[in-house]
Every structure is written in C-alpha cells, then in structure tokens.
Amino acid sequence: MRADGEGLLCARIVETEAYLPDDAASHAFRGRTSRNTTMFGPPGFAYVYFIYGVYYCLNVTSEVEGIGGAVLVRAAEPLAGLDVMRARRAGARELCTGPGRLAQAFGLGREHDGLDLCCGGTLRLEAPYEPAGDIASSTRIGITKETDRTLRFFERGSAHLSGPRSLNR
DNA sequence: AGAGGGATCCCA
DNA sequence: GGGATCCCTCTC
C-alpha cells in the first residue's frame, strides 16, 4: 500500500482479516447504516472507521456492490517514509504493527473513508514490492462473535505481525 | 490487567 | 434518550 501527502509512504501488507457477509463479527452484519455504508459499495474501496474513541482502522471493501464485506488491514512492513511514520507514532518502535498503529503511521482518518484504492489516488493498493512468502491463517483478533472462524491471514515469519505469538505460527 | 476514549447502535 | 458495546493501544 502507498500514500502520498507528507512525502511518499509505502508498506507491504503482511496481516489481514476477512469480514464476510453473514458474519456476526462484521460491522455489516445488521445491515447498512451511516457508519458502514462504504462496506456495501463496490470492492477495492477504503472503509475507515473510528474505534475506542482513539484509533482508526483501514479496511478494503471486498464484495460486489450491495453486499457488505471488507478486509481489515492489520499489519504491514514499512518500506518508505519511515521518518514521517515515526513522527506520527511519537517515536514508538512498532510503526505498522496493528490496525490502529498502521492507520496512525499513515495518517488515516475519516476523510479516507470511501476512497478508491485501485485507481492511482493518494491512497492506493499496488502489486507487492516483494512476492508474498508462506501465508498462514488463524482465528481473528479482538472479536467476541464467530471466534472460531479462521479468517485472519498473515505472512508466516514476518517480523511485523500483531497479535499473540501463539497465533502467528 | 486496566483505563482511556467517543462514536454508534439498539431498544425504550 | 440511556446504556452497552466496540475489528485497540499504552502504561501500569
């Protein structure tokens, strides 16, 4: 993923979670509301929401228009613009490990909700700088419903994964 | 392990 | 309107 603005920011996504239609853990589960409207739009758009009064989280819509679904971007390996990320993260060591931190490092907020990530805009998804390694799956983090579904996906061995180590094998 | 923080949503 | 809940993080 890349972002323009305060210099060029670039990071390689290493951890995601899927939120499917008919998934009680998904914001879209109870239907369309003003908050989750983007989830019901076309695929490849940013769904950004505010959580716990503090953080934002970035998702990529993943279903055809009219169906609510998205992929939460949980962690990434920073590749460019580390100085800007560090400044935004107040010098913390982990820059893009965890959805709240990643959004903070990239300076994401409500204004990014609904942006097209696939048409070369200021925030965009691109082909990976380096091919993916071994992809493994686990249960999802931070949810209380549908906790048995293995819909979290991560690059095994990455040094930039969030979550308990026991999930990252 | 516990607090912080505020928007959102559901049910009165 | 009130109250529970929340796809989290930091500091203790």
Image (cartoon, coloured by chain):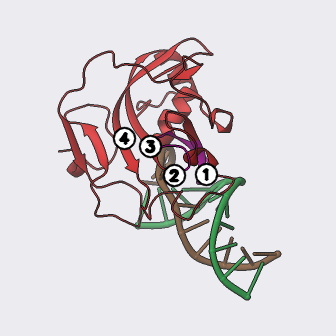
Chain colours: A red, B green, C brown
In the rendered structure, which disc, 4 or 2, sits on the residue that comes first in sequence?
4
In the rendered structure, which disc, 3 or 4, sits on the residue that comes first in sequence?
4
Residue that mark 4 sits on = A16
Q: Is residue A158 magenta?
A: no
* Residue A22 as seen in the image, left or right of residue C2: left
Residue A36, disc = 1
Type of amino acid under label 3 = Leu
Residue A38, horizontal then vertical, whole percent = 60, 44
Q: Which residues fall within the magenta stretch?
A: A48-66
How crowded is the residue under tag 4: few (<14 C-alpha within 10 Å), some, or many (20+)?
many
Q: SS at mark 3?
A: strand
Give the letter of the chain under mark 1: A
Q: In the picture, residue A65 is in which quadrant?
A: top right
Q: Are marks 4 and 2 on the same chain?
A: yes
Image quarter hosting the C terminus of chain A: top left
A101 or A22: which is nearer to us? A22
How crowded is the residue under tag 2: few (<14 C-alpha within 10 Å), some, or many (20+)?
many
| Mark 4–mark 1 distance (CA, rounded to whole Å) | 19 Å
Q: Are marks 4 and 1 on the same chain?
A: yes
> Which numbered mark, 1 or 2, is in the foreground of this view?
2
A119 or A137: which is nearer to us? A119
